[in-house]
């Protein structure tokens, strides 16, 4: 059976540790404390970045669906590289998203290519704006790179006319 002194001592030690951890949290020193005891802290993602990634995943999957639909409707157009790039971009954000139904591409190849080039251009501008909103520097770099790739896709698809 535990003695009253041992019980009180354990309770006091628990309160002291909890107070120390609370103070470290308030002073934003938990990471320093963790490093001090030999534990490398794990960075938590910013909730705003999580919401941003979810929205981007939906946008990229919608663009991928649009590219795939255009490639199926117009198999003579050289859209396979753009399907591959769009697939890579959708995977880069790492969040599976529900792909919305997209409008059927135009039966006219020139109109379909123009619409696809416009969609790539809009996506490029959106990713550039998203890169500015990102909290994480790594996410900002990915989105900036994605924006540049989408701009190149817009140009390349536009040249298919």
Image (cartoon, helix red, strand yellow):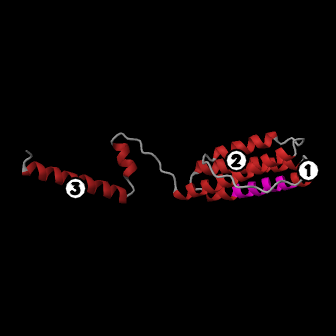
Name the front one of labels 1 and 3.
Answer: 1
Q: Is residue 83 left or right of residue 4?
A: right
Mark-to-mark CA distance, 1 and 2 = 29 Å
Q: Residue at x 87, y 55 (%)?
A: 106
Q: Nearer the viewer, residue 44 or 3?
A: 3
Q: Residue at x 52, y 55 (%)?
A: 46
Q: Is residue 131 visible?
A: no
Q: Quadrant of residue 131?
A: bottom right
Which residues are the magenta region?
Answer: 114-128
- Dot 2: few (<14), some (14–19), or many (≥20) neighbours within 10 Å? some
Residue 153 versus residue 35: which sits nearer the camera?
Answer: 153
**Separation of disc 3 and disc 2 at Cα?**
49 Å
Residue 81: which quarter of the image?
A: top right
Question: According to the image, label 2 marks what residue?
Answer: 145
Mark sitting earlier along the chain (3/2):
3
Q: Is residue 159 magenta?
A: no
Residue 117 falls within the magenta-colored stretch: yes
Q: Which residue is mark 3?
A: 15
């Amino acid at each position: 059976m535990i003695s009253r002194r041992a019980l009180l001592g354990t309770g006091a030690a628990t309160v002291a540790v909890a107070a120390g951890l609370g103070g470290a949290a308030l002073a934003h020193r938990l990471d320093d404390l963790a490093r001090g005891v030999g534990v490398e802290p794990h960075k938590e993602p910013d909730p705003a970045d999580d919401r941003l990634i979810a929205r981007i995943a939906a946008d990229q999957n919608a663009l991928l669906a649009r590219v795939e639909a255009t490639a199926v409707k117009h198999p003579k157009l050289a859209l396979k590289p753009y399907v591959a790039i769009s697939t890579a971009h959708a995977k880069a954000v790492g969040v599976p998203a529900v792909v919305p139904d997209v409008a059927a591409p135009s039966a006219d190849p020139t109109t379909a290519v123009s619409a696809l080039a416009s969609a790539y251009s809009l996506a490029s501008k959106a990713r550039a704006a998203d890169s500015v909103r990102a909290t994480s520097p790594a996410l900002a770099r990915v989105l900036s790179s994605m924006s540049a790739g989408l701009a190149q896709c817009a140009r390349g698809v536009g040249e298919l006319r």
